[in-house]
Amino acid sequence: MSDVADIPPGELSEDEARAAHARIADEIRLHNEAYYQDDAPTVSDAEYDALFARLLALEEAHPGLRTEDSPTQRVGAAPAQGFAKVRHSVPMLSLGNAFDEADVGEFLARIRRFLNLPEDDAIDIVAEPKIDGLSVSLRYEKGRFVRGATRGDGSEGEDITANLRTIGDIPDKIAGDVPDVIEVRGEVYLPKSAFLKLNAAHEEAGAKVFANPRNAAAGSLRQLDVAVTAKRPLRMFAYSWGELSAEIADTQWEFLERISGWGFQTNPLSRRCGTLEDIIAFHTDVGEQRASLDYDIDGVVYKVNRLDLQRRLGFVSRAPRWAIAHKFPAEQAMTVLNDIDIQVGRTGSLTPVARLEPVTVGGVVVSNATLHNEDEIRRKDVRIGDTVVVQRAGDVIPQVVRVVADKRPKGATPYAFPTHCPVCGSEAVRGEDEAVRRCTGGLICSAQVVERLKHFVSRDAFDIEGLGAKHITAFHADGFVDGPADIFRLKARRDVLLEREGWGEQSVDNLLDAIEERRTIGLDRFIYALGIRQVGQATARLLARNYGTLDAWRAAMNAAQDRESAAYRDLLDIDGIGASVAEDILAFLHEDHNRQVLDDLDELLEIEALEAADTDTPVSGKTIVFTGTLEKMTRSEAKARAEALGAKVSGSVSSKTDLVVAGPGAGSKARKAAELGIETIDEDTWIDLIGG
Ligand code: IVH
């Protein structure tokens, strides 16, 4: 074909250009597959680039050739701005769950009752593994893949067509007796082996590691840069359909055979079952193979095979009556508990962590597991040296489930939970009704100091770029940073920083610049950064909004140390702040060293009041109480609107309340308002008042 290849594309006839385009596009697809899926390039980069350039030139001269499935529209395409939304014309539903044989029996009985079938009538069932990946819907029009979307909320997903085009299991074209419109649905997953490889590479590069193959698949698929998706060897099993312009099968089994004939992967373990016994045997059989499969499954799915029966059975709410997911119990494995480490958290909490002989649990190597707290260890009588059963379920941290009693080594003694902090040696105490034991060392405990500092610079707090947990730990160990204020004094120590191993001018200056950038901060972030117990982002925002400035807040908290004061009542009156949170806030601000930290920071920083709320509205400056059920907006929405309009929202009615908005079911608060003669309005009047 070199004759055609040498001719400038503009001089080729439409037909010649189309033929050349098809040939080069196919060749590039093969190279893509070799490179991206098999990690085994078949041509040099230069040859690949030349082919690609030729394809681009052809499309330039003959724009009709730039079809959606052209390789030029795939890998390496410019990143999209977010993902467009796609409405599913046929919703993507979920499945009901069965946890044991009785649930499955009930599922079959329900079907018989619904269809009015005799009890001994066999129901043909297709049993398939339930793939733990991400469900997607692939739309083909006239045999061409035109759009692919995530499940989203079932009605509306995201358009990830470009990303899906990089997956080898998803054909670009399907041929044969294909309906004009067909949406094939299935599960995209990352093989366990690829997940382990990916995480190992990420770990080495200091990048984020994924918790499990499902998260890794999701992270890989929802990439704005398609080239990143293309490097991840994602796969897909197809098992269902959405919109169809014509029927293609009479049974689920026939459907699977048809789509398999079109080039989709269907799960090879799927089987037809006639009886409850067959079904349960399938569940057991697949369960036994589970750990050795290269993909995660979290159960099996049973589907009524005949589609006419499926249609009669229909749906209940968001799940079909004709299918059910029979879940597997969480994956477990046995291993030896080598040691128990105690981690000290930001607020001094001592958390026991099991150090395990590494063991593979469902394809993931586990070497640490949580033991929760002191009582859990006692209840399970976990001893160092014990053989234990560990379990991993979905995204949760692996847990120690139980001890294998007959494998206990001789001489193993009950675990004595430390009564002193393993880091600073201070006494560790348990409050009444508290499950957690806490170090009382406060800021003399370096573990707490470091954890607090890590929190201080974390993303939702000061968010200092380049100052991660690793640097904080090192800076603290080397005596550069003892408290949060020291971070803002690092500038003066530029020379010392420059002497540190691994730090050059550029990196030191970048860090110092990043710190400078955060010298101005909103009061809400500032309060959150302090790391007061129970004061998360929402509470910090409430405090910032209610008190306005750091000075006002501190003055009010000083006054509120007197639990009889109006300031204390005002604090409790903030909707969302209860007595226990108030105690933690007051205790924090009562500590001398915390006050010192605040003084220092106040001097070093520019702390901004929360974006000023509207002052010229019918509710600005008023204290409002919402009570009863609101029907047109949620409570939090109503609160946010009121606050944005300059009102304070309080949780209880007092003489300070200006307005009560009462929905149906309002009780004592509405009565109290009536007693105090406070204006009370209903939700509609409220909405009119705030202008809809
Ligand atoms: S059928 C109308 N079959 O499980 C029912 N779903 O919990 C359509 N899933 O959203 C689903 N493997 O993402 C079906 N073999 C399989 C499946 C499967 C995994 C997922 C799917 C669905 C979820 C429901």
Image: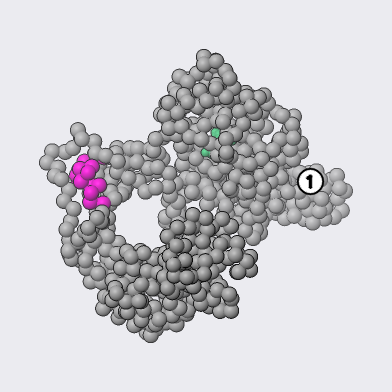
Q: Is residue 102 left or right of residue 81?
A: left
Please tell me whether residue 430 is drawn above or below residue 498 in the rendered image: above
Q: In terms of image quadrants, where is residue 495?
A: bottom left
Please tell me whether residue 563 is drawn above or below residue 178 in the rendered image: below
**Which one is in front, 678 or 308?**
678
Instruction: Tell me, yes or no, if residue 490 can be seen here.
Output: no
Q: In this view, does 487 lie to the left or right of 128?
A: left
Magenta part of the protein: which range? 373-388
Q: Quadrant for the N terminus, please.
A: top right
**Which one is in front, 20 or 479?**
479
Q: Position of residue 188 (x, y in %)?
A: 56, 42
Q: Quadrant for the C terminus, please.
A: bottom right
Instruction: Tell me, yes or no, if residue 154 can be seen here.
Output: yes
Which SS class for mark 1? Answer: helix
Q: Where is residue 138 in the image (x, y as percent from the top left)?
A: 66, 42
Q: Mark 1 points at which residue?
A: 20
- The answer to whether residue 378 is magenta is yes
Q: Position of residue 146 (x, y in %)?
A: 71, 45
- What's the colour scheme? one colour
Q: Quadrant of ligand 1?
A: top right
Residue type (three-letter) at the residue carrying disc 1? Ala
- The answer to whether residue 472 is magenta is no
Q: Is residue 569 left or right of residue 188?
A: left
Q: Where is residue 572 in the image (x, y as percent from the top left)?
A: 37, 69
Q: In terms of image quadrants, where is residue 637?
A: bottom right
Q: Which residue is drawn at 56% across and 79% down?
A: 615
**Which one is in front, 192 or 278?**
278
